[in-house]
Amino acid sequence: MSINEIVTAITEFTRAHEVWAIPIVFILAFGESLAFLSLLLPATVILLGLGALIGESEIAFFPIWLAAALGAFFGDWVSYWFGFHYKEKVREMWPISRNPEMIDKGHRCFEKWGVWGIFFGRFFGPLRAVVPLVAGICEMRQRHFQIANFASAMIWAFGILAPGALGLRWFASWMG
């Protein structure tokens, strides 16, 4: 199944079953932020598509945004936990074992930027998967990690959903 088919299937399911929008968005954002799943799941594209669906339907934006932010927050938290508890053993875990150099890239980002690396790492695809993991490996203070994690999750979720959700509504009201 191609990425386009996956995006279409999930978007159409959500359109037909709007009550599932919040858990679907939560799971997608969680998967996109979880170190292991984010390498396999094309969630960003799906979330952008769901943002457009929100814009063309009567689905309320705030609960969906909150679900995306919480999913991203908890995905990074679990990644941090894995890094904290398994340290360098994560290099041997699949799918990271296929690209262990990603840990090195995340480590360089984390060493250079510290807590700001956690915040900005969420906005850069490949780093999003490993920076929280590296923060755990390096035993970053959890309070600092969680502040950056929470703030970036809120902004990331808005940025991924708002263009479709609010842009389509604005355009529709502007047109007529």
Image: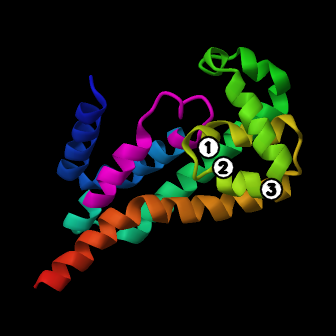
State the extent of the magenta-drawn residues as a range: 32-52
The residue wearing badge 1 is: 128
- Residue at 68% from the left image edge and 17% from the top image edge: 93
> Cβ–Cβ below 8 Å for labels 1 and 2?
yes
Classify residue 148 as left or right of residue 137.
left
The residue wearing badge 2 is: 121
Q: Counting residues from the N terminus, which is met first, the one under dot 1 or under dot 2?
A: 2
Residue nearest the viewer, comparing 156 with 73: 156
Residue 113 vs 136, above or below: the answer is below
Give amino acid for label 1. Answer: Arg
Q: Residues within 10 Å of mark 2 (few under 14, many from 20)?
A: many
Q: Is residue 35 magenta?
A: yes
Secondary structure of the residue carrying tag 1 is helix
The residue wearing badge 3 is: 115
- Quadrant containing the N terminus is top left
Secondary structure of the residue carrying tag 3 is helix
Whether residue 57 is visible here, answered yes or no, is: no
The answer to which quarter of the image holds residue 82 is top right
